[in-house]
Amino acid sequence: MTAQTGFKNKFTAALLALLTGVLGGHRFYLRGLRDPWAWLHGPLFLLGLLGVWRFVAHRQDDPLTWALLAVFVAVVIAVVVQTLVIGLTPDAKWDARWNAAAVRRSQNGWGPVLIVIFALFMSVGSLTGGLAYVLQRFFGGS
């Protein structure tokens, strides 16, 4: 799968992955509307949100809720990993994959790296909070 028409900016792709990744925005930007994986992001995220809603709003603690929460976590982890991969791809490799036919070359600088740093901060904070809750629930009961 090589480049499509138009110049693909790595900063834009990383920012879309961070902000709209759960809905597949970065994949639509890079691969277009025919990308089946992009269309899968949204429904899986909504299923995961259903689990969050069941757990937070209704205090339901059943296997279905935990399965839906696992879907939510999987989607978020996939988006964070995709943000890291996009943001940390060297410019030459990025251009070879997404801008092979373009005359213009990428000169991204620190923008994608700052997006990666922010994504790592968000994921570490979420992981710490989630682990604290799960461990407290496991060892402390209710």
Image (tube, grey):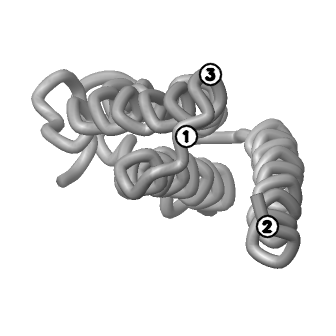
Residue 8 vertical position relative to residue 101 in the rendered view, above or below? above
| Residue type at numbered disc 2 | Gly
| Label at residue 105 | 1
Quadrant holding the N terminus: bottom left
Classify residue 15 by image quadrant: top right
Mark in the foreground, 2 or 3:
2
- The front one of 76 and 25 is 76
Q: Residue at x 49, y 62 (%)?
A: 93
The outermost residue toward the front is: 142
Q: Residue at x 83, y 77 (%)?
A: 139
Residue 70 appears in the picture as rendered? yes
Q: CA distance from mark 2 to mark 1?
A: 56 Å
Residue 133 at what x, y percent from top left? 82, 57
- Residue picked out by circle 3: 57
- Residue picked out by circle 2: 141
Q: Which type of secondary structure does the marked residue at label 3 adopt?
A: helix
| Residue type at numbered disc 1 | Arg
**Mark closer to the chain start, 2 or 1:** 1
Q: Residue at x 23, y 37 (%)?
A: 40
Classify residue 58 by image quadrant: top right
Q: Residue at x 42, y 29 (%)?
A: 50
